[in-house]
Image (cartoon, rainbow, N blue to C red):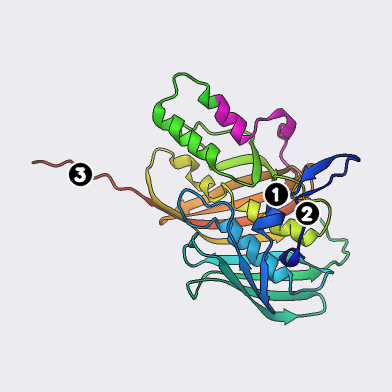
Amino acid sequence: MAASLQPEDVIESEEEGTKDLRSVLVTSVLNLEPLDKDLYRGSHHWVPSTQRLFGGQIVGQALVAAASSVTEDEHVHSLHCYFVRAGDPKIPVLYQVDRTRDGRSFSVRSVKAIQHGVPILTCQASFHRSQESPLQHQFTMPTVPAPEELLTREELIYKYLKDPSLVEKHRLGLNKILAQDIPIEIKPINPPDMFHRLPQEPRQMFWVRAKGLIGPGDMRLHCCVAAYISDYSFVGTALLPHMKLRLAFIASLDHAMWFHAPFRADEWMLYECESHWAGNCRGLVHGRLWRRDGVLAATCAQEGVFRVKQNSPNSKL
């Protein structure tokens, strides 16, 4: 399991005679250090511009810790997390696992992510032994352009930077984005207008996968990687109709996932995100992760808190 993985940085790919860099999500981000039974320490890879720890990293690492305490034939089918404090990027995170229940079909684990002696995240994950059932259905995957027909986020930014009319503040902002070392590849379906900030429907879709090779390997590891991926650009979907507003604060409150079918997180998956509601300084977003063959791999949900900057009244002095 990922908590004790010691992978090589370069491995043989599925195409004979070629080698690929193994994903940093395996070699670093989700590779926890065991300290004691059910106690692990995680380090950081990418820290957002907010200088708070990326929520997907904490969720993914918590799931690694939880999955390390179940048998090999048990696979996560759901997780429910609450972000209770902002993560400090200057120190590691400790993950303490409680073996809440071991049943014949289902096992439940509770995980606390701890910094400075207090929890920054609480997580409950449920694991299931596979069972056949004739009761099956799913939605139909949206029809979208294939990832090979689209530009990556970085390629889009380079395209914007070539525009001689681009104002300097936008140029600086785009270069800051390029400087971030994010271990995820993203290809937006309909990228929003980054400069005119025009309001649009609270819905977005993009192809996403881990950078580097993970390989078919342990399905539990792919679920942990998907948990990391699922938080990226997710709660921001609720902001798309409100692009004209200036935000003072944004943070995730909770995160939930349900896993439906086997998948590989290092292969392109379509992430379909939509926000059905926002109000009272909160917004709710739902997401679906689709395999390229149209199989629904996972469903996600997240609520975030949004505070808007208030315009100062004009002085009459």
Circle number at residue 8: 2
Q: Which residue is mark 3?
A: 313
Kindly tell me whether residue 197 is visible in this rendering.
no
3 and 2 marks in contact (CB < 8 Å): no
Kindly tell me whether residue 15 is visible in this rendering.
yes
| 198 lies left or right of 150 | left
Judged by depth in the image, the label closer to the viewer, 1 or 2, is: 2
Residue situated furthest left in the rendering: 317
Q: Residue at x 85, y 66 (%)?
A: 130
Residue extent of the magenta highlight: 141-159
| 111 lies left or right of 68 | left
- The type of residue carrying mark 3 is Pro
Q: Residues within 10 Å of mark 3 (few under 14, many from 20)?
A: few
Of pointers 3 and 1, the one earlier in the residue sequence: 1
Circle number at residue 289: 1
Q: Residue at x 65, y 45 (%)?
A: 184
The quadrant the C terminus occupies is top left
